[in-house]
Image: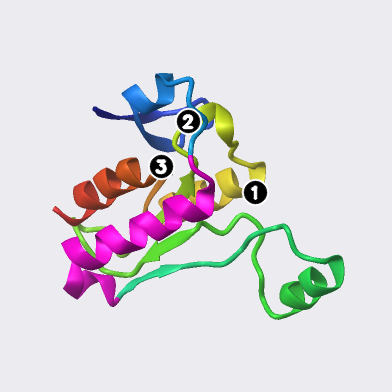
Amino acid sequence: MIKSQRNKSNILCYWDEAFNASKVKSPLEHIEQINLVAHCRKLWPKEFNLMLHVPNESNVPVQYRNKLSKCGLLPGASDWLILWPSNGKPYMVLELKRSRKRDSSVSQDQVDFLLNAEHVGAFACVAYGYKAALKSIEEYLK
C-alpha cells in the first residue's frame, strides 16, 4: 500500500509501506527511473509528451560539473518535471528516490527546490520508488 504524508521538512512524501519495511535493499535510482518512464509512457501517453527527467546527478568529474553549472545546472532540481497542468496546479516536480527510505536521502538543496516550487503553486513531492511515484503522478493528474 502506498502511503503519503509530509516529512519533518514539510515535503510531501510517498512510499510503499511493505517495500520500505523489507530487509531487501532497494533497486538503484536509475532502475527506478527506467521503470517509471516505461509505466508513464503506457499509462499517460498524451501527458507523457510533457514529462521529462532532469539529469542532475552529482557523480560527474568536477570540471564537467563546473561547465554544467555555467550552463544553468541548478543544484537540488527535482528528477522529474511534469509540465501538464492539473487540479489548478501549473506543473509537478517529483524527486525520485530508491524504494526504501533508508537507502537514500533528500539533500537540503532538494528540500529547498521542492518547497520553492510548492510556494509558487506547483505540486511537489518526493517518491520512494517508481510505484510510489506512479501514485503521486496519478493523484496529480486525476
Q: Residue at x 41, y 59 (%)?
A: 34
Dot 2, how many residues are within 10 Å of its Cα: few (below 14), some (14-19), or many (20+)?
Answer: many
Are the residues flagged by discs 3 and 2 in contact, CB closer than 8 Å?
yes
Is 39 within the magenta?
A: yes
Dot 1, how many residues are within 10 Å of its Cα: few (below 14), some (14-19), or many (20+)?
Answer: some
- Judging depth in this view, the residue of 109 and 42 nearest the camera is 42
Distance from Cα at disc 1 to Cα at disc 2: 21 Å
Distance from Cα at disc 3 to Cα at disc 2: 7 Å
Q: Which mark is residue 109?
A: 1
Q: Is residue 122 left or right of residue 78?
A: left
Q: Which mark is residue 129?
A: 3
Residue range corresponding to the magenta coloring: 27-49
Amino acid type, mark 2: Arg
Q: Residue at x 73, y 58 (%)?
A: 59
Q: Which residue is mark 2?
A: 100
Is residue 70 visible to us here?
Answer: yes
Q: Is residue 12 left or right of residue 44?
A: right
In the image, residue 28 lies at what x, y percent? 54, 46
